[in-house]
Amino acid sequence: MFEYAEFDVSPTTALSVLETPMKLNQPVTQNERTYSQDLNLISTTDLQSNITDANASFCEIAGFTLDELRNKPHHVVRHPDMPPQAFADMWKHIR
């Protein structure tokens, strides 16, 4: 099983996060969601890191519908403890 930390975010806050290009780190609730290691969480992005598609499992774990995620920066689903430099390095190599 994998663990996923949930965010303590109201639906209104979550929607405002999706509407803004700025990343808003929310407090982590310390509640973890477990999911099967057989579950594939898949998303695709354009070269600007905007989500273009995601499978149902990714959307369920992220807590958003595909319509809510599509064309939004991928960082809206990034855990606030994940160092931004890790993704900066990845994007440097992908681009």
Image (cartoon, grey):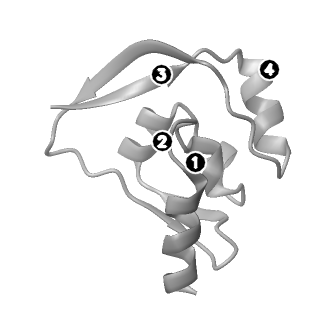
**Could you give the CA–CA distance between mark 1 and mark 2, rounded to whole angstroms?**
6 Å
| Quadrant hosting residue 39 | top left
The label shown at residue 6 is 3
Please state the horizontal and vertical placement of residue 19, each as a whole percent of the image. 84, 43
Q: Residues within 10 Å of mark 1 (few under 14, many from 20)?
A: some
Type of amino acid at the residue the image marks with label 3: Glu
Q: CA distance from mark 4 to mark 1?
A: 17 Å
* Left or right of 14 on screen, residue 74: left
What residue sits right under mark 2 in the picture? Answer: 59
Provide the secondary structure element on which disc 4 rests.
helix
Please state which amino acid type lies under the numbered disc 2: Cys
Dot 3: few (<14), some (14–19), or many (≥20) neighbours within 10 Å? some
Whether tag 3 and tag 1 are in contact, CB under 8 A, the answer is no
Question: Which of the two labelled residues, at mark 4 and mark 1, occupies the earlier sequence position?
Answer: 4
Q: Position of residue 65 (x, y in %)?
A: 58, 39
Q: Is residue 1 above or below residue 77?
A: above
Could you say which quadrant of the image residue 5 lies in?
top left
Lower sequence index among marks 1 and 2: 2
Image: 18 above or below 4: below
What element does badge 1 sit on?
helix
The span from disc 4 to disc 2 (Cα, nearest Å) is 18 Å
Residue named by callout 1: 66
User: Residue 30, position in %: x, y?
Assistant: 44, 13
- Name the residue rendered at 48%, 22% in the picture: 6
Foreground label between 3 and 1: 3
Q: Residue at x 77, y 36 (%)?
A: 17
